[in-house]
Image: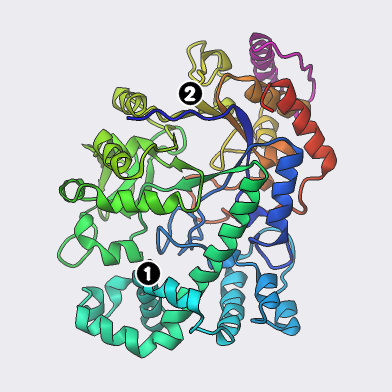
Amino acid sequence: MIKSTFERGAGVLCHISSLPGKYGIGSLGSEAYAFVDFLVRAKAKYWQILPLVQTGYGDSPYQSVCCNSGNPYFIDLEKLFCEGLLDEEELKDAEMPGGKVDYGQLYRRRYETLRRAYARFNIKDEQFVKFVESGLFDDYALFMSLKSIYGGTFRDWPAAYKFRHKAVLDEFRRNVYKGEYCFWQFLQFEFFRQWKELKAYANANGVRLIGDLPLYMASDSSDVWAHPELFLLDEDLEPVSVAGVPPDYFSATGQLWGNPLYDWQKMREQGYAWWTERIRRAYGLYDIIRLDHFRGFDRYYAIPNGSPTAEAGEWRQGPGAELFEAAERSLGKLEIIAEDLGIIDDGVIKLRSYTGFPGMKILLFAFDGDENNAYLPENIGKNSVTYSGTHDNATAFGFLNGMTESAFADFGRRLRAALRSEGVSYPFVTRRDAVRALIRCALATRSDICVIPVQDILGLDDSARMNVPGTSSGNWQFRLTEIPGRQQAAVFRAAVRAAGRL
């Protein structure tokens, strides 16, 4: 395969939902452009985000109703106002208190606002007609229209819809075309128009976008509904086995995700066309793709559907390099970061080595006293991406704040040794100072790319944590109160300069 090379540089991890603003959740509006400006001042070359997809039950960006969709919550309402689709009163009514995202309130209020905007939209607009006729979101628009009318999951719908009888679906589309069908198309049309403008602004200012591509599809999604032959389902379209991970550091009983598993043999027979198209569309959104749960492409964990925990699963063989070879033949060089965390064995290491994709190194996991720890800076090679932590970890300050005095003293000694090994002089005493030292250490590694969560740049505690793996509530809610200022940009810029990442 063609090996990717990345320009040495620094990046910041901050999801769109975490941006500040007046409307309850971050958007593609002025705050997103202001965040790009912060990245430019901070000399960050990369902005990493979580999946942009429309979320479903649980609000997780890793459980979407459509893997290629954009989240309607991220549509900038002020741009809709400027387009004449909302009036001043409606825009004012859409305002919500600051602080964490309240998804319940957002769900109840935002779609009402978006429907008002759609009521004024000209569905005969030439660009919109072209967008709809492309067919890219036909399955999604049908799926969401049926869900709006029948509720539940697609398995609860009348059989003709559940099993996608073509004549019945064609009639349904005609009947709801101007109402539900084009409303959902409109949301995607607006989202992608706004996203492409933001991406163009970032790229023009030297910032590349790293986007996240989840491995699995949500069980109740347009993807599974439209392509049941590509998943391991029974005759009633129920999953035979579901995804998850076995017991590990995060959970004594493992993690039961519940996503249906792919029929990799069927995927292979089709030349991995579905995956190739998915990756192609992802490159329309991002400059670099982070493949979540990369180990599942080597071997994946299958749990019998209905199991109460993930303990009873088994490992099965995944598609391996064939999938990436097929995608590369169609798309050319793949700029991909492999999320290779968790249970990693020789198979995963060999697959990552063959593809040439850089893996991830998490500095919070480095200082356990094991000199062979793969996350220790001295053991990190060039073809990798180093993080202080990820969206699944405690914030750096939260992690350190949870330590006893003795544990923090041990951590401090090991961090100081790592700083010396990287040629960095950065004295620290307090835990807040240690966060800044950890960032300096991460930036000094040999990794081509180093990404720091915005929470760590700001030294925030665990109240700013994005996600706790294995839990189903209280996640994905973190928001900035304001865009980091010039002083914070200057501090980060100095660290980037000291690490030779300008």
Front residue of 497/228: it is 497
Q: Quadrant of residue 293?
A: top left
Question: Could you tell me residue 34's position as x and y percent?
Answer: 74, 52
Q: Residues within 10 Å of mark 1 (few under 14, many from 20)?
A: few
Q: Examine the rendering and report whether any part of residue 460 can be seen.
A: no
Q: Which residue is mark 2?
A: 383
User: Which residue of the protein is positioned furthest toward the right in this rendering?
Assistant: 487
Question: Could you tell me residue 149's position as x and y percent?
Answer: 39, 84
User: Which residue of the protein is positioned furthest toward the front in this rendering?
Assistant: 126
Question: Could you tell me residue 227's position as x and y percent?
Answer: 25, 62
Q: Amino acid at mark 1?
A: Ser
Give the quadrant of the C terminus: top right
Q: Residue at x 28, y 37 (%)?
A: 325
Is-magenta flag for residue 487? no
Q: Which residue is mark 1?
A: 134
Q: Amino acid at mark 2?
A: Asn
First in sequence, mark 2 or 1: give its number. 1
Q: Examine the rendering and report whether any part of residue 5 can be seen.
A: yes
Front residue of 350/287: it is 287
Range of residues picked out in magenta: 405-432
Q: Residue at x 40, y 38 (%)?
A: 334
User: From what the image shows, is residue 44 above or below residue 381?
Assistant: below
Front residue of 404/145: it is 145
User: From what the image shows, is residue 403 above or below residue 464?
Assistant: above
